[in-house]
Image: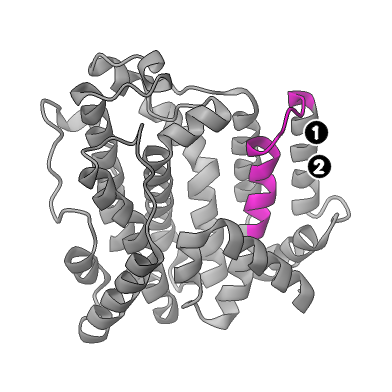
Amino acid sequence: MVERDHVARSKAIHRRTGRTFYYATRLLPNRVREATYVLYAFFRVADEVVDDADGTPPDDQRRELESLREQALGRAEPEGPVLEAFQAIKERHGIRDADVEAFIDAMLTDVERRRYETYEELESYMNGSAAAVGRMMTAVMDPDDPETALSHATALGEAFQLTNFVRDVREDVVERDRIYLPQTTLEREGVTSERIERFEMDERVASVIRTELARAESLYRDGVAGIKYLPSDCQLPVLLAAVLYADHHRLIRKHDYDVLNNEVELSTTRKLWLVVRVRWHWQWNGDPEEVFRRVSAVPSSQPLPRGRHHESLPTR
């Protein structure tokens, strides 16, 4: 059983660290919303082991993550309310061990890995860091046809994370010495990692960012196409989350793709405006794809980045 205090603590973590997703979470039905708070809090606890290490040696980070793995899988006594609540949620909703394992494995990758050579390598990382999260959320929502819903949930989770990677290029360099833009994309445009590290913006860097936005937007379309397979009381919140995350693309374009020297963050006013617009369109048209097309910053068709071929984009 999940104690009320445990949920409250998880909710506080979610509200403090997941400001964009929190707006959509509040529209989830109670049966899903409280479990979502717990899941997000668990993800943050693990993420902070590597993102807020404060000089903690890599071996200590790995030990802490392995301890979290054992607790999350129920093989060790939970240390604190978040892990205790996660164990209960995992058992109640049948969250697969494989998805927990994949998530912790991705966090272990972050302990030492700082660059990704190809998009395929990055996609493998996202299978744990984003796609596994989407699959856990799907288990909590309990759709009638989980297998059909899962592939779309995977795509949407990857889309969210790609948006984060593009939005947070500067932050990842400054705070974590990481670059999540694939090295092959950089090399194709004649951009070195050193240029990214020095925040030297030019048209070649802009082309890299356009390419990665196009990847993400292809994934958004795939992910949103699967929202209809979710329970009816979960569709609007997931759609809203997609619209909110994708709206960062609008700001990136507004800044001429310069994510190296500009902070890309949605204002509270903008978020509230999008909530109103999505709910209004949803009231008159309950088709997730159509509402997303009308409201989101994602173009309805996929324009290829200038001078690039189809194989530079993900295929699903």
* Residue on which the image places disc 2: 67
Where does the image place residue 93, in percent across and percent down from the top left? 64, 68
Q: Which quarter of the figure has residue 85?
A: bottom right
**Residue 115 can be seen in this image:** yes
Task: Using the numbered discs, state the Cα–Cα distance from disc 2 to disc 1 in whole angstroms.
Answer: 6 Å
In this rendering, is residue 46 above or below 274? above
* Residue on which the image places disc 1: 63
Q: What residue type is labelled 2?
A: Ser
Quadrant containing the C terminus is top left
In this rendering, is residue 33 above or below 160? below
**Residue 73 can be seen in this image:** no
User: Mark 2: which secondary structure?
Assistant: helix
Answer left or right for 195 relative to 35. left
Which residues make up the magenta segment?
Answer: 41-59
Where does the image place residue 238, in percent across and percent down from the top left? 40, 67
Q: What residue type is labelled 1?
A: Arg
Does the magenta segment cover residue 314?
Answer: no
Task: Pick whichever, 269 or 144, lies toward us.
Answer: 269
Does the magenta segment cover residue 55?
Answer: yes
Residue at x-position 36% and y-position 73%: 272
